[in-house]
Amino acid sequence: MGFVLRAFRISVEGEGYVYHAKSRARALGDAFHAYTHARGSIKFADFLRLASCRQEEGGERFGDPITVLGKPAFFVTSNRQYVQFVRPGRGEVFNSHPLDVLPVEYRPDTYRSEKFDAQALEPCKEMAS
């Protein structure tokens, strides 16, 4: 199985956020849960009246194959702290420490050096023995 996620921009009351999900319905559901967590109780039907949803491009490397802890995955996005990825055929987005991700080009800039590459291999050597 391959990469199954799509990127959706959901805007509510002038604020827009990108959600990564298998379907538009799942993205709206995720946005609804985030909205009610931040703003309080609201019926889903009322939320749908407030929200707009459109599919958009996921980013330059969105969906590229990577490995996380030596297992196959697909790149979703990253920030300075985590790399977000999804396993083949799955819809759940996970966070990973950048040193667990290969190839190195998919790590945030601050984790791309020979010093970090050597550190990343140390835990693997310990686990193998």
Image (tube, rainbow, N blue to C red):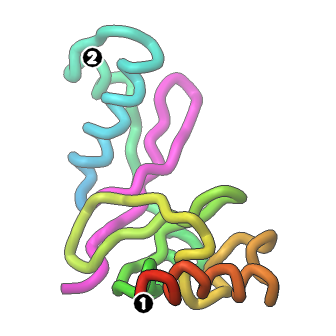
Camera-near label (2 vs 1) is 1
Q: Position of residue 7 (x, y in %)?
A: 42, 61
Decide if residue 92 is on the left or right side of residue 107: left
Q: Nearer the viewer, residue 52 or 122?
A: 122
Badge 2 or badge 1: first in the primary sequence: 2
**Which residue does the image show at 26% across and 79% down from the upper left?**
88
Q: Does the magenta segment cover residue 23?
A: no
Q: Position of residue 117 (x, y in %)?
A: 70, 86
Res. 19 mark: none
Q: Quadrant of the N terminus?
A: bottom left
Q: Quadrant of the C terminus?
A: bottom left
What is the magenta range? 1-21
Q: Which residue position is annotated with label 2?
A: 46
Q: Quadrant of residue 53?
A: top left
Q: CA distance from mark 2 to mark 1?
A: 57 Å
Seen in the picture, residue 4 relative to 96 is either above or below; the reply is: below
Could you tell me the amino acid type at mark 1?
Answer: Ser
Q: Which residue position is annotated with label 1?
A: 129
Q: Position of residue 20 (x, y in %)?
A: 39, 57
Decide if residue 89 is on the left or right side of residue 96: left
